Image (cartoon, helix red, strand yellow):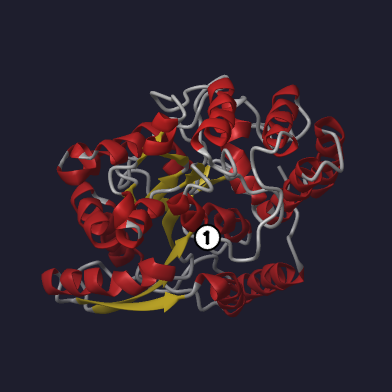
Amino acid sequence: MQRAVRNSAVALVLATTALAATACGSSGGGKQAAADQKQTLTVWGMGTEGEKLGEVAKEYERAHPNITVKVTPVGWDVAHQKLVSAAAAGTLPDIAQMGGTYLGEFADLGVLEPVDTKAFKQDDFFKAGWDQGVADGTAYGVPWYVDTRVLYYRKDLAAKAGITQPPATWQELQEDAAALQKKAGSKWGIYLQSSGLDTVQSFYPFLYSAGGAIVDDDGKAAVNTPAAVKAFDYYGSFFSKGLSRKSVAPGYDVTKDFNTGVVPMFFSGPWHMGILQQQYPQLNGKWAVAPVPADQSSTSMAGGSSLVVSKDSEHKAAAQEFIRYLTGAEGQAEWYKLTADLPANKAAWDSGDLAQSPDLQVFLKQMETAKAAPTLANLTEITSKVDDALGSVDQGKASPKSAADSAQSQVENLLK
């Protein structure tokens, strides 16, 4: 499938990269250093991961004295532009952290080195984690960490409402949301994002559980299939029935309302476990997590990041060894202790807290069925159309079918 270029900045990268490749007569880096030679690896890590990676790099250097690992932390707010600029200038680091939202774009530009699938086995990782690093059938990223969304709920308020177990189906989720309002005194039954940027992230678990997709396996728009329309309808019903609020202030923090009981349920990833434990210790024992309630299945979204190697790197062998260290079972287990990022390598879950914590086991179960968004060059632009459709449904401005039809037409144009 031919991908559309997302914006003028990316178009500039594409033109510049093509010109540079023509000028040098090569699609890759120059002379390659052997893994055991003395050399410096440059690595860009984003957000918290970039801040923590330096500690791991020092340990690696002690065991590999011929390698210096130069880690540059990059804020997520500037990560995309820095990657775009570096790709245009031919100055990408040897290794970069990259999420699925970016990977399709940079794979499309031809600036990433394909993964050596003899060195990295797909079966060692969660399928959804591996899929985030694949574009047009070629793996460009090795899964580093994963996350997925599950249901957080107040056990004490559920008991007050006569609810004895977490909701397992769509029907039970809506019934429980209503019961929590009527019997437990919660102002809202659940929090779901109603509109704005990345509303689709809140919508994915419903879309996937209904058997729907934004883009199907053949690369065609699927926003108005019966399964997708069903998910639009169900998601919107929480707002039309007054079970979830239609708007929140910028920077809204759901944990504050979860603490007070104003919101007794919400969907989120593993990072909220640490936030609740540290900031609201008075809630310990009063909340739990549960799998996404099922329609056709219980299927949540997959997130996380992969590690990619620049096509122009002259240190590919050493880069591969460092990535092997970071993504192996032992390295992943240690990374979890340092960051609480969920391991992408399945073997890392066999011991320690990852194997023993009931809450973490919920995330493990959810990751086994989680689905990754398609790795498309213009994925952000595509999902923005779904964001708009969801907003129109949730605010009562359009029916699920009409909103889905409108988004379908726009997404089809973006896929041409």
The kind of residue on which mark 1 rests is Asp
Q: Residue furthest left?
A: 63
Q: Which residue in the structure is indicated by mark 1?
A: 253
Res. 150 visible in picture: yes
- Residue 36 x %, y %: 19, 69
| Residue 227 appears left or right of 79 | right
Which quarter of the picture shows residue 290? Answer: top left
Looking at the picture, does residue 1 appear above or below residue 142?
A: above
- Residue 235 x %, y %: 67, 35
- Residue 248 x %, y %: 66, 57
Q: Residue at x 51, y 53 (%)?
A: 257
| Residue 122 appears left or right of 335 | right
Task: Name the residue nearer the viewer: 45 or 391.
Answer: 391
- The quadrant of the picture occupied by the N terminus is top right
| Residue 161 appears left or right of 207 | left
- The quadrant of the picture occupied by the C terminus is top right
Task: Name the residue nearer the viewer: 57 or 274.
Answer: 274
Q: Secondary structure at mark 1?
A: loop
Which quarter of the picture shows residue 220? Answer: top right
Crowding at mark 1 (Cα within 10 Å: few <14, some 14-19, many 20+):
few
